Amino acid sequence: MASLAARMPWPLVLLIRSVRTVLLCGVLVVIRLSEAVFRHRYPSFGPRLLRRQLESAGAGFAKIGQLLAHRHDVLPDRYCTELASILDDLPVVPWPLIVARVRHDLRIGSLTEIFLEFDERPMSAASIAQVHRAVLLDGTPVVVKVMRPGIETRFRVDLLLAGALARLGNVLFSLRRLGLRALAAELDQLTREELD
């Protein structure tokens, strides 16, 4: 699946992720309704549903969740606490894709041209990249951060959608006080730095 997503043209990625964003908007409506009806009986329902949906919506939305975890001015504490669990525990990219990415980025034919050892198991797998232990040919231990295949395109699309959602939220729901456009701009800046 990851290699398929990495090869998709960005208009197709935009279409697929737009549909996912519309579904996420539906989930937000369900969360809003559940807050009104079930909050006292099931206080963790809304926060857990939001976290799970942001994680499953992809790397860009997981990053939004990470940012929102620190925004107690935007969300209730129980939401911030739940969103704080979106950290470095995302699915691992298959080993052959990692090898292909490293070979491509370093312009080498084989990992053995540079590395004496390269741990197949990642130390962590986050929204943008995963980290592997390795040892250079001279014996120096290093940590190698490997970008997820196709992440640049998916993040560009997610940032575009996040900006559009922020503008829509400001216009339709009078959410200017929440600073959604500033949050989208912050996400854009942080992601560009991390992808660099």
Image (cartoon, helix red, strand yellow):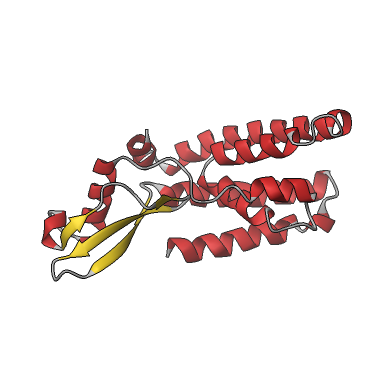
Q: Nearer the viewer, residue 61 or 95?
A: 95
Judge left or right: residue 22 versus residue 45: left
Q: Position of residue 56 (x, y in %)?
A: 55, 36
- Picture quadrant of residue 188: bottom right
Judge left or right: residue 154 versus residue 117: right
Q: Position of residue 153 (x, y in %)?
A: 44, 49
Quadrant in which the C terminus appears? bottom left
Quadrant in which the N terminus appears? top left
> Residue at left 41%, top 53%?
129
Q: Position of residue 92 (x, y in %)?
A: 38, 42
> Residue at left 71%, top 58%?
181
| Total residue callouts | 0
> Residue at left 78%, top 54%?
74
Q: Nearer the viewer, residue 3 or 88?
A: 88
- Picture quadrant of residue 67: bottom right
Query: Can residue 130 be seen?
Result: yes
